Image: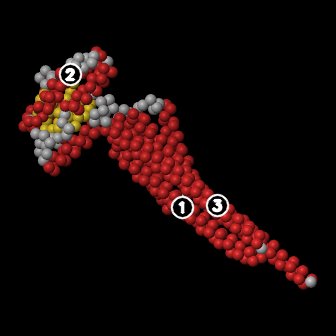
Amino acid sequence: MQHQTRFLIYGFAVIILMMMALAFIALYSPSSNNIEGNFKVSRQLEKINLINELATIIQNRTRFMQSMLLNDEQFIEDESWPNFNRLSGAYSETRNRLVPLLAPREREIMQAIDRLDKDISDLNRQVSILFLNGSRNEASEILLQEVLPKTAPLLSHLSELTQSQRMDVQKALLLASNEAEKSRMQIAIFSIIAVLVSLAVTCIAILYWRKLSGQLQDMNSYLEQRIHERTESLLDTQKELLEDNNELTRMALTDNLTGLSNRTNMNQILRREYARFERHDQRFGIIMLDIDHFKKINDSFGHDTGDIVLKKLALIFESAIRTSDFVARWGGEEFLICCTTIEEDDLLPIAETIRHLVASTELEYVGQITASLGGAAIVKGETIGELIKRADVALYEAKNMGRNQSVVSEFTDITMMQSAGSSL
């Protein structure tokens, strides 16, 4: 009897120890694995948050440059510049927080982002200096030809870095799932052993296993939702940046007052037509138009009325030219029209049509006004600068003939016209 009692005591002791071991493994081993998985996922989410902050800073900086060039009511020089400088400090602070969290391959991407951001920052400072010095066209050209092409790779690197974080989060979730699977296997094995000695231990293990599975599923669903929200947020930010870049491109090529192409855009059009002329021998011509006595309009009626006149004339020019032609505000009250696929004899009828339209239009406040026009068609061996000079000389000849005239330069008379232009 004593041996049986001792055996029962030893048996109960073994059962208690097995139950304690099962409880210890069930409670702490999965928790430890879950804590490690949660830490890895939290670390990746922190990196995604910091990348979003960098994207927001870049977006605010781009909007600042847009406000500066538009010179809108939101741009106040004394207040906006300190805010712009604070953006640079915020970028450095966010970057310093992000870099220690990055893996070696991610730091290489970050270095590429830093180089692009440094180049863009330097260019932004150049644009700012040019803007403050009044060189608006040059500032717009730098934005168009240098800043905007560098912005697309910067966005691409940010997207690549975010995608890398998403993949790392998915790996962490997969690791957590594998660890959970191992934990479930351990629990199942100990449950099989425990069921032989205690039905209660088996019930506890099953209940805990179900509880753990539910928690893991809830955690996976929550993390997937957070990752989706963060990714959508970054995509929205990238879309806004691209829209801002498109707006900057439009601003850099458009005259703010009339809505026509500006001088920068017209120079690009002339270079394109010149290249087509050299390759395919398709001639083009230009017509320079100057409003007669425009200074009197500003002096008599004010610059606001002068602006209204320029806007109205811009609409007339756009409706008068062919669909294949281009018109730009060349400067002040001077406009330039590029006529594509044209011969020299075609320029005068086009110029006369525009001149008659201007002279026959009744304008608010000022009544009827006139314009003088000078045209020239490109010839072999002539540069764009020489073509513009010939049209300019023809324009001055029209002025000297009493204004409200159209004169088309012939290439055979270029020497005489250059002499006339010099005397003027």
Q: Which amino acid does label 3 sit on?
A: Gly
Q: Nearer the viewer, mark 2 or mark 3?
A: 3
Secondary structure state at the residue bearing disc 1 = helix
Task: Tell me the tag on residue 214.
Answer: 3
Callouts 1 and 2 close, C-beta under 8 Å: no
Residue 135 falls in which quadrant of the image? top left
User: Which residue is identified by label 1?
Assistant: 170
* Front residue of this view, candidates 143 and 383: 143
Whether residue 218 sits left or right of residue 291 in the image: it is: right
In which quadrant is the C terminus drawn?
top left
| Cα separation between marks 1 and 2 | 69 Å
Q: In x, y percent, where is residue 284?
A: 15, 41
| Residue 320 seen in this snapshot | yes
Whether residue 124 sits left or right of residue 287 in the image: it is: right
Whether residue 320 sits left or right of residue 305 in the image: it is: left
The residue located at (44%, 48%) in the rendering is 238
Q: In x, y percent, where is residue 183?
A: 66, 69
Q: Which amino acid does label 2 sit on?
A: Thr
Q: How crowded is mark 2: few (under 14 residues within 10 Å), some or many (20 or more)?
A: some
In which quadrant is the N terminus drawn?
bottom right
Residue 35 falls in which quadrant of the image? bottom right
The residue located at (87%, 77%) in the rendering is 9
| Residue 388 seen in this snapshot | no
Callouts 2 and 3 close, C-beta under 8 Å: no
Q: In x, y percent, where is residue 19?
A: 77, 71
User: Which residue is identified by label 2?
Assistant: 361
Q: What residue type is labelled 1?
A: Gln
Q: Is residue 366 above or below residue 58?
A: above
| Cα separation between marks 1 and 3 | 19 Å
Color theme of the render:
secondary structure
- If you read the primary sequence from the N terminus, does the residue marked by circle 1 or circle 2 appear first? 1
